[in-house]
Amino acid sequence: MESDRLSEWFVPKFGSRNFRLSVGILFLPYTGMVVSFAIWGSLSVEHELDRIISISLLYFFAIGVAAHCLDALGSKKKPWGHISHRKIWIVSIISLAISFSIGLHYAFLDSWLLFPIGIIEGFFLFAYNLELFKGRFHNNTSFVISWGVLPVFAGAAIQSNTISIETIILSAIAGFASYILIITSKKYKILKQQNANYEIYYKKETMLKIITSTVIIGTVLFFLTAYL
């Protein structure tokens, strides 16, 4: 069984161990999916570019940085090996401070729907990643809601403080994509932990690459279409 995840496909193959760990712990393809879902929400209603950038930064720091750092702390198997808890907490707190500052700014300005969305997201961020309440919320349903559905809602809320029919449809698609991602990822991790032959887990790895790249590339095209 591998002691850490530095051999993962999303971890750079170059640079020092600390560099590779710092990039790998962000799970950039998965973070890209979440940020993409937030952009979907923004594009589903009347939108402004500065708010698209804001919601993207909010989710990058909240999920891409803070949530993944907390997951490294909360995981019983310590997938990234022995890392400084103090440094992880500092990075998490700073990242959350940035994301909450962005969210609160727009929530008080004109997007009050960000309040309930932020509270729910905050709950899942700690309950899921730190496996609180005996890990009761560390499950597929929590993942789908916090990583798929709510980012789309937040993207729409920051723009118009409304949830449109288009937003709901896109959130359902995002939720489905998140579900496929998490079940595939779990099967992939089990195969890796069992030291299965590369040919066996390669299909799961390829599926993860297809899911993330399709969402991210699709979002880029969606975004360009809206602004060209």
Image: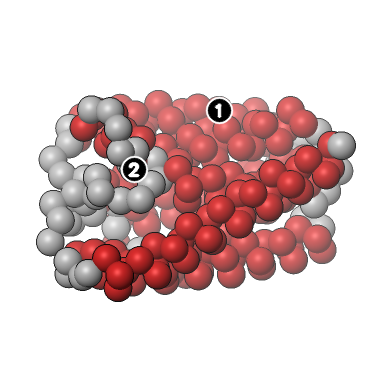
Residue 89 appears in the figure: no
Residue 187 appears in the figure: yes
The answer to which of 77 and 216 lies nearer the viewer is: 216
Quarter of the image with the N terminus is bottom left
Residue shown at the point (35%, 50%) measured from the top left: 9
Mark nearer the N terminus (2 vs 1):
2
Q: Secondary structure at mark 2?
A: loop
Quarter of the view holding residue 214: bottom right
Neighbourhood count class around disc 2 (C-alpha, 10 Å): few under 14, some 14–19, many 20 upward: some
Q: How many marks?
A: 2
Q: Is residue 180 left or right of residue 116?
A: left
Figure check: 223 above or below 93: below
Quarter of the view holding residue 188: bottom left
Residue 42 in picture, x, y percent from top left: 74, 45
Q: Which residue is mark 1?
A: 101
Residue shown at the point (71%, 36%) measured from the top left: 52
Q: Which residue is mark 2?
A: 11
Residue shown at the point (84%, 42%) measured from the top left: 226
Q: Secondary structure at mark 1?
A: helix
User: How was this image coloured?
Assistant: secondary structure
Residue shown at the point (44%, 55%) measured from the top left: 124
Quarter of the view holding residue 108: top right
Q: Nearer the viewer, mark 2 or mark 1?
A: 2
Q: Distance of mark 2 from mark 1, alpha carbons?
A: 30 Å
Q: Is residue 112 left or right of residue 48?
A: left
Name the kind of residue labelled 2 in the image: Val
Residue 155 in picture, x, y percent from top left: 69, 46
Figure check: 147 above or below 21: below
Residue 161 in picture, x, y percent from top left: 77, 45
